[in-house]
Amino acid sequence: MPTHRQKTSEAPPCHPTFPGDISAETFLQDYWQKKPLLIRQAFPDLQSPLTPDELAGLACEADVNSRLVFERHAQGPWHVVHGPLDEDDFSGLPETHWTLLVTDVEKHVAEASQLIDRFRFIPDWRIDDLMISYAPEGGSVGPHIDAYDVFLIQVHGQRRWMINQEYDDDCLDGPELRILKRFNAAKAWILDPGDMLYLPPNVAHHGIAVNECMTCSVGFRAPSYSSLISEYAEKIAADIDQSSRYQDPDLVCQQNPAEISSDALVRARSMIAEKLTVDDDSFVRWFGEYCSESRSGTRVYAPDTPFASFDGLTASLKTDNFIAQSPAVKFLFADIDNSSLLFVDGGSHITSQVFARTITDNRRITAQQLIESINSDADQQAFLDLYNSGCLLIQ
């Protein structure tokens, strides 16, 4: 039966260097969103956050996003079975040419969070998730393109990666996955454990397991124009007084009643333009909440015994306690005037700048560090609310 065990460990440094022999500044200037980069032994001593059995066990949990991809299947090529999986899904698997993928692993396994933190030279709001894939020989998800940056880190076995930046983007008809119809490799490498391949958006790539292997993929958020505009417009529409309607008290008779007059067009255009004007403060709040909102469906567990007051919460803390971010949520902040907006799991809290920086700089800090950062009643309330909602944990 697949197994999964929760792991915990110390938080890594909050300001990591780029994995490899170049600086983070050089990587961002020369490679980020520009061209691929292969780094041999970027992580020479890296251990997989999970064993294959533990990854399979995680894939069976209800709030975990997982899938099995079969290159050859009775229901057609590149068939996908979505999780949560069960023991029957793992019994009778073919010996080759299938892949297990589990996304958002960092929300469930502490070591996965540590691996993502190695990439915090890129802003947290841009980091999406860690996906781990397991495949026997020949396992693949087909040649495809991604609309976002990705770091592909080999943690066990070997995988052959092939890429091309010039390609025909026609995809196969039928499969759920977007598999390129035609793919010719311009470059190819075999990655060993510890090797890492960075790919910017829209580079065609195809990874095939040379032998039993596991690969970690650190992916990044790249909101589309349409998503940003539609979701911001939806937020504006929700805040508008629904009783406000089009008005034309100066209406006059017109020669042809079927005509939409220039006055009507000007009036309607002005109504929309007035409401869609981007107000700086309200946009900052919306964008922070939008970026911190979880899209994985991972549950946040509130404490069994919430506290009614800040004093009650702090009185319960011991000198050796740590305060940790729940791995299921994202913590972000933005400064406004002399305070900060702290964004957590799609919500926001007005706090002091010291408190916002302290709680976001590392995933885990001492209780004493947190208490010393509290400078206002708003900080106290934010700490209390975040603990009672399960976003902050006492360890």
Image (cartoon, rainbow, N blue to C red):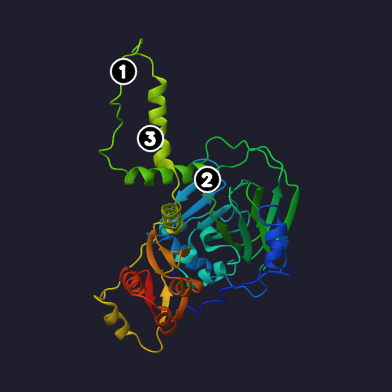
Q: Is residue 45 above or below residue 284?
A: below
Type of amino acid under label 1: Val
The quarter holding residue 196 reads bottom right
Which image quarter is the N terminus in?
bottom left
Q: Which residue does the image show at 39% across and 41% down from the upper left?
A: 275
| Residue at 30%, 21% in the rendered image | 251
Q: Can you say whether 190 is above or below 356 in the image?
A: above
The residue at 26%/77% (across/down) is: 309
**Residue 271: mark in rendering:** 3
Residue tagged by mark 1? Answer: 252
Q: Position of residue 55 (x, y in %)?
A: 49, 65
Label 2, on which residue? 224
Viewer-proximal residue, 26 or 50?
Answer: 26
Whether 313 is drawn above or below 36: the answer is below
Give the number of marks. 3
Whether residue 50 is visible here, answered yes or no, is no
Q: Secondary structure at mark 1?
A: loop
- Depth order, front residue of 225/171: 225
The CA span between labels 1 and 2 is 43 Å
Inspect the image, locate mark 2, and give the three-letter code of the amino acid beneath it: Ser
Left or right: 258 as drawn, with respect to 22 = left
Q: Secondary structure at mark 2?
A: loop
Tell me the quarter of the picture where residue 42 sits.
Answer: bottom right
